[in-house]
Image (tube, rainbow, N blue to C red):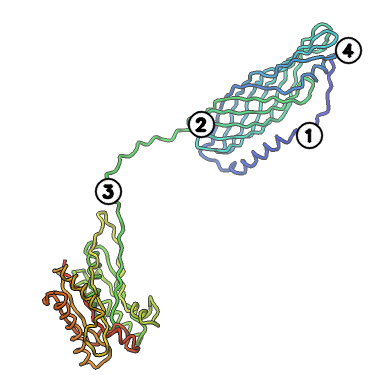
């Protein structure tokens, strides 16, 4: 038998798939080798599969035959069954190290030669391996993996010549180190048991020390030690239906007349809402903040804002029995404007009370009284004039209809003036209010007993009298609806 022992060389093309697989494994190592988790532990397994050999049997036959014979044809059987057993340690969800034993089965060939004769050859491969495995979990149960490893394989060869063929050594064996790569899927039925489907490519040395391959497709079973199923927790009984607890908070904003701390009738409806909240939730408290515009002395404005806050506290305590220790009055003067003091509207918004009321939790839910309609109609007049202008007839008729539709309410008509003399101011403002009352009685059919006329002169300025626009706004009548106590 003639054997050619070629020099051992490896080209880049040969190593390329192994290098790519190694790069894949290194990436996974970088992602998770130092982060051990609940998936770590030992495991064992086994697999059965089919082997497909990729060996140059013609070249083997030609090398083994003597010089005076020529190979005419060759028939090969490159498929067989194989198995492997393995054990490994899984460091975490991504990385494990695995060793095992494999038997890839046999491959054989029959070569016909000239002069007449034949040569039958058979090789079988088995050995041990060590693999580095990188995993990529797809779902809680399914993961993919790649591996790169090294094998130490034993090859057993046997040759049976016929007629004129002669083989000097018909039986031989050899052992070699070679690399391997693989890809696969693993599905965990339980934390302890999993199925594995994988394909591996083994690098082999054939009978004449040429490089060949064996591709092994297998299906296996894996048992993982120390893995426990998650405890089954009995579902808790359905809770009795309840209304979701809600948090209720409220604030209050009311405005004041110029240089005045008295609470206007129209604002008392807002205070009724706040009082209902405080009575509904006796554990809540309120901070009543008083504010002014920036007209006048700063210290005087600070005192005015304090009086405004205290007037609200007094009103809530006297009319709704709110304990005073739940109410705090604080005056801020002109220091916290919410609008531009350069305009009349801005000044008016800054003359205010803000009530900040603590939050309350309630399962049943709060249904407070809403602020009822005040219909604070403002009617403007020429200087020292008390006649009702025709342009207000439509509004007054609507007020009359509201009063007739709601016989349990009353109305107060308030008259106001600008900076005329005090005596004239009171007289003119009272006359303005009275003429509106007369209109509602005579034209709208409202019972006079339900109407009250009051003149406030120039004591309740809506705007400053420093401009004609401000004076015009102060020459007015307001109609305030009064509701019976709930």
Location of mark 2 (residue): 188
Say whether residue 398 is left or right of residue 291.
Answer: left
Q: Quadrant where the N terminus lies?
A: top right
Of badges 3 and 2, the one in the foreground is: 3
* Observer-nearest of 438 and 351: 438
Say whether residue 379 is left or right of residue 335.
Answer: left
Q: Where does the image place residue 151, in percent across and percent down from the top left? A: 69, 27
Q: CA distance from mark 4 to mark 3?
A: 100 Å
- In the displayed structure, would residue 39 be above or below residue 398? above
Q: Where does the image place residue 370, in percent across and percent down from the top left? A: 24, 65
Q: CA distance from mark 1 to mark 3?
A: 76 Å
Location of mark 4 (residue): 68
Q: Quadrant where the C terminus lies?
A: bottom left
Q: Categorize mark 4 by other alpha carbons within 10 Å: few (<14), some (14-19), many (20+).
A: few
Q: Residue at x 31, y 63 (%)?
A: 249
Q: Secondary structure at mark 3?
A: loop
């Amino acid at each position: 038998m003639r054997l050619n022992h070629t020099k051992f060389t490896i080209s880049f093309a040969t190593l390329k798939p192994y290098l790519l697989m190694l790069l894949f494994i290194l990436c996974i190592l970088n992602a998770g080798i130092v982060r051990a988790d609940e998936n770590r532990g030992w495991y064992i397994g086994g697999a059965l599969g089919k082997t497909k050999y990729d060996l140059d049997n013609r070249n083997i036959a030609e090398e083994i035959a003597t010089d005076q014979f020529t190979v005419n044809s060759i028939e090969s059987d490159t498929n067989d069954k194989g198995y492997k057993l393995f054990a490994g340690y899984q460091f975490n969800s991504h990385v494990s190290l695995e060793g095992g034993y494999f038997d890839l089965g046999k491959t054989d060939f029959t070569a016909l030669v000239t002069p007449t004769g034949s040569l039958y050859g058979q090789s079988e491969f088995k050995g041990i391996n060590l693999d580095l495995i990188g995993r990529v979990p797809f779902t809680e149960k399914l993961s993919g993996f790649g591996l790169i490893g090294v094998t130490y394989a034993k090859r057993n060869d046997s040759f049976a010549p016929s007629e004129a063929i002669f083989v000097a050594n018909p039986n031989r064996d050899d052992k070699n180190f070679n690399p391997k790569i693989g890809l696969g899927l693993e599905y965990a039925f339980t934390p302890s048991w999993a199925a594995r489907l994988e394909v591996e490519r083994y690098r082999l040395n054939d009978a004449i020390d040429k490089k060949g391959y064996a591709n092994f497709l297998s299906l296996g079973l894996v048992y993982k030690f120390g893995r426990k199923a998650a405890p089954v927790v009995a579902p808790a009984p359905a809770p009795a239906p309840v209304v979701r607890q809600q948090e209720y908070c409220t604030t209050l904003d009311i405005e004041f007349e110029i240089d005045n701390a008295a609470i206007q009738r129209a604002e008392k409806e807002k205070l009724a809402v706040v009082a209902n909240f405080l009575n509904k939730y006796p554990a809540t408290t309120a901070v009543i903040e008083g504010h002014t515009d920036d007209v006048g002395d700063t210290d005087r404005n600070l005192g005015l804002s304090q009086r405004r806050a205290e007037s609200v506290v007094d009103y809530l305590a006297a009319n709704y029995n709110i304990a005073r220790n739940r109410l705090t009055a604080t005056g801020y003067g002109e220091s916290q404007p919410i609008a531009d003091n350069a305009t009349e509207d801005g000044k008016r918004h800054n003359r205010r009370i803000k009530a900040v009321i603590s939050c309350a939790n309630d399962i049943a839910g709060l249904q407070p009284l809403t602020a009822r309609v005040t219909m604070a109609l403002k009617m403007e007049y020429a200087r020292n004039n008390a006649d009702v202008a025709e342009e207000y007839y439509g509004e007054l008729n609507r007020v009359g209809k509201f009063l007739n539709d709601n016989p349990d309410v009353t109305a107060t008509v308030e008259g106001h003036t600008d900076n005329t003399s005090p005596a004239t101011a009171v007289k003119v403002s009272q006359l303005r209010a009275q003429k509106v009352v007369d209109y509602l009685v005579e034209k709208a059919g409202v019972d006079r007993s339900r109407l009250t006329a009051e003149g406030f002169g120039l004591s309740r300025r809506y705007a400053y009298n420093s401009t004609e626009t401000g004076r015009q706004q102060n020459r007015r009548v307001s109609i305030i609806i009064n509701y019976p106590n709930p």
